[in-house]
Image: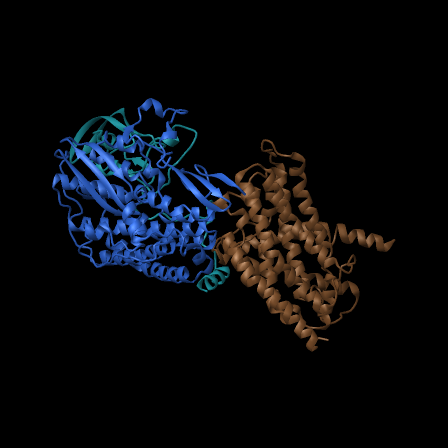
Amino acid sequence: MSKVVIPVGPQHPALKEPVNFRVIADGEKIVQLELDLSYNHRGIEKAAESRDFIRVLPLLERVCGICSHSHATAFAKGIEELMQVTIPPRAQYIRTIVAELERMHSHLLWLGVAAHEVGFNTLFMWTWRDREAVQDMLEEISGNRVHYNMNEIGGVRRDISAGEVASILKRLPVLEERIAEYVKMAAGQKTMLMRFCGVGKLSRAEILKYGAVGPTARASGVDYDTRKDDPYLVYDQIPWKVVTENDGDVYGRTKVRIGELSESLGMVRYCLENLPEGQIRTTAPKAAPSGEILSRYEAPRGELVHFIRTNGTDKAERLDIRTPTLANWTSVAAALVGRNLADIPVIVAAIDPCLSCTSRMTIVDQDKNEQRTLPVASLRPGNTGRKEGGLFS
Amino acid sequence: MSVLTEMFRNLFSRPVTILYPAEKVPVPPGFRGKVTIADEKCIGCSKCSVVCPARCITMTDSPREVEFKGKNLARKKKPRVKLYKCIRCGLCERHCPADAIHLTGEPASCGPSREEVTA
Amino acid sequence: MNDILYLVLYVLVFPGFLFLLGYALFLEFIDRRITARMQHRVGPPWYQPLADFIKLLGKEVIDPAGIDRKIFDAAPLIALAAVMTAFIYVPVIGGSPLAFEGDLVLALYLLAVPTIMLFLLGWLSRNVYAAMGGVRAVTQLFIYEVPFFLALLTPALMAGSWSVSVIAEWQQQHLWFALLQPIGFIVALIGLQAKLERPPFDIPEAETEIVAGPWTELTGRRLAVMHLAEDVALVTGCGLVVALFLGGPLLPWDVGPAWLFGIAGFFIFVAKTLCILLILSAIKAATGRIRIDQLNDVGWKYIASAAILQVAVVFVMMSAGVIS
């Protein structure tokens, strides 16, 4: 076959959310790749600017369905720092427990999706079955499976009762056993190894050059974790270690994620066993003093950044969210060129992309070196101005 | 190898799938479901309507005598919740001074009549 | 007269086409059920394959712009006809009455027809995913066909006949070929899995890469018939392997009247095909999809060499007079 253009996305079975790759392939080999993002702009940043600090948190949880707690915590943490409010230790522990449970359910979900991308549906079913256990714990703690709504400015909304602590501690060993099983499976499943090893390889230098974050970076030996480098909540008080691997390929990212699963489980267990007594919230002022803050948080997918500017009212004047997926996209594009067509779903899935969270509308024209935003009128259907919006077009 | 053993173990054990309409998953206590309002407790302060992020609570006229902290109050309004718009965040429950609005374990309802989707 | 009536009944009703179609849907159900249970799911009810088939028959047939409608309509039917014809030569209740010297080769060639039809469909549907899938299907055909043919021809070499029924009867007096030629048996199973395009060889229809490959533009009754052809190919393939390697439907000793022998043979056939299906389903559930270049590597380096090794071993065994 001569060179053909294969459109992968915006609607494609490999992608759970819309993104577009225009793959120019020579037979099965990718020779060129054009990436087009931002099909799902939802205007959450703008909407967040019109809501007070009580009402903005449920909105921010809806930036992402998987890391809902991450966005709410990153924002709450930033605002609390601006207000100079210290939340009680029990609230910090509860936030950490929910954050680590969330990381576990996200990584289990990822493991299933990655297996599905190589057609290994059995592992997909098993991990999602075990993920249910984590979701049940979260539901018990927070009252909901997806949007936990645990945060408020100044603490957490719900306490964890002694009964809940006991019931979760009782269910953790089963999960631990399952995670040990996945470690064995990842190392011993031949077809999965064939598809993961050496695929999407990025060296340490490349990771640093493209600014990748999270498990993607840690799989290439970059020892970067916001929880360690800029500790928040109780991460500097509890025992855990940063999981890194030196493979740099999809298999390395799998190992990092499975390693983080057991680290998270250990953290949840430690926090539950050492849950300090006391208040779960302090009274925070209604309005925040004017100021700017950059709140960093280690979401399951990598470093999440919330930039918040306040102006002395009870609303944020500007909120800018940099999701980990945005930081990782460039590394994907770099890893794909020259690879086999069949590697696209694997390499894309390996960064655990969360596309709707990433969608922003800023046009960067590389040739003219200028940056502009779109007027509202051009966002009407049929006039998206998308042609010029692609990151690599 | 662990894949094979687990596969055959599963083959001879009960599947974990829950056949939904026939079986249902028990809901844990504290689940955030359908909103209910205790009419005899509500003092009509509008706080729930103010904090609601989805703006699904409107205040409607409902004059009534209510007992609140040992005193008798004459309330003018009571909240009405559009359940199809509700995101079940529970902020109304959290901020209610009279403990009158609650999220129950019941799942969200849908239906053709207005009564079924308002509380 | 009676002979002709018997032949017509054999071909059209039992164990011919009518039984074949029913059994094909039944095997699909068993396959889906076993896979589901291995994945800890419940799986579909027994009538699901039939329900799917009827539903698809009732669906609208959509013609992609600029296709050749006649070929698009004919290709699934040709595929189905080919695999159904191949089944006539598979012994189900004792040797096939239509058996002739060389029917093994005919059956093998008929089994390759669906893949070629898939390539045609993919190439003609003017869709980049379908074309991609069609090319992959043919590439894969070239890789697995050689070891698969070699593996199925070694029993013929040893039995000294090119007829499936005769080979099955030969095993009645001797040992099963699965025991005599274990390498050939394994290669045949792998080749069958590749032929049926099941994981880890579902490369032509890789869902997450090229949507559905050549199936992408198939709709309505074309899709229904193509699915049925795939199910029938599953039965025919399992039946062939059973006949060639597991002694077919024949008992190692003679029992009573002919009708009892036939009934016993039928149940043996069902039991043995289900065993083969269990192995195929287990492979399907335990593996992910490999890449076409990896299949090329594995196929030519290991599977083809194993098949050739088996042929060599058979020659040595025959010249040494191990099997008379």
Image coordinates of residue B9 in percent, x first then y, are: 47, 63
Instruction: Tell me which residue sits at (31%, 51%) in the image.
Output: A215
A157 lies above or below A50: below
Chain identifier for the brown-coloured part of the image: C
Q: Nearer the viewer, residue C324 or A27?
A: A27
Q: Nearer the viewer, residue A321 or C36?
A: A321
- Quarter assignment of residue C258: bottom right
Image coordinates of residue A144 in percent, x first then y, are: 32, 44
Residue A96 visible here: yes
Chain identifier for the cyan-coloured part of the image: B
Instruction: Tell me which residue sits at (23%, 48%) in the image.
Output: A95
Relative placement, left or right, of C12 versus C181 is right
Residue A361 visible here: no
Chain identifier for the blue-coloured part of the image: A
Instruction: Tell me which residue sits at (38%, 27%) in the image.
Output: A384
Image coordinates of residue C167 in percent, x first then y, are: 72, 65
Image coordinates of residue C277 in percent, x first then y, are: 59, 58
- Quarter assignment of residue C218: top right
The quadrant of the picture occupied by the C terminus of chain A is top left
C175 lies above or below C259: below
Q: Nearer the viewer, residue C154 or B12?
A: C154
Q: Which color mode does the image show?
A: by chain
B9 lies above or below A327: below
